[in-house]
Image (cartoon, rainbow, N blue to C red):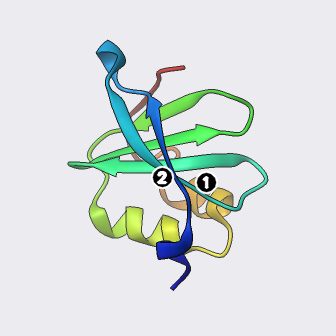
Amino acid sequence: NSFCTRSMKLLSVKEGGETMQMISVNSSHIDSIGYENGTLYVRFSSGPTYVYSNVPEAVYAGLMSASSHGSYLARNVKGVYAYHRVG
């Protein structure tokens, strides 16, 4: 499965400068994605990182396995879960 072959990054995306393990994805708009305890981290290729709250693990799994990460994010995450920008 391709999930295991993706490269990992450590990025300072949490408040207080803590690092979050992010997984690089093959997407024209999304650079990498991370998930921890119901919080979804999405770093866009243009630079900013958005943090989405209370995201079920099934939604994260769907995002990671989607053929288009950007389309899945637009349909299943944006406008559904509270978010804020961290960078």
Who's the residue at 42% across and 48% down the image?
34
Q: Is residue 82 above or below residue 67?
A: above
Quarter of the image containing the C terminus?
Answer: top right
Report how many numbered discs are placed on residues in the image.
Answer: 2
Would residue 6 appear left or right of 31 to someone viewing this image? left
Residue 65: x %, y % from top left: 52, 75
**CB within 8 Å, label 1 to label 2:** yes
* Residue 53 image label: none
Q: Secondary structure at mark 1?
A: helix
Residue 85: x %, y % from top left: 50, 23
Q: Secondary structure at mark 2?
A: loop
Residue 75: x %, y % from top left: 57, 60
Label 1 – label 2 distance at C-alpha: 6 Å
Q: Is residue 40 above or below residue 46?
A: below
Judge the density around disc 1: few (<14), some (14-19), many (≥20) Cα neighbours within 10 Å.
few
Q: Nearer the viewer, residue 17 or 37?
A: 17
Residue position for label 1: 74
Q: Which three-letter amino acid code belongs to the residue tagged 2?
A: Val
Q: Nearer the viewer, residue 41 or 54?
A: 41
Residue 84: x %, y % from top left: 44, 25
As drawn, the residue found furthest toward the right would be 28
Who's the residue at 36% across and 17% down the image?
17
Judge the density around disc 2: few (<14), some (14-19), many (≥20) Cα neighbours within 10 Å.
some
As drawn, the residue found furthest toward the bottom would be 1
* Residue 77 image label: 2
Q: Nearer the viewer, residue 49 or 54?
A: 49
Would residue 50 appear left or right of 36 to someone viewing this image? right
Q: Which three-letter amino acid code belongs to the residue tagged 1?
A: Ala
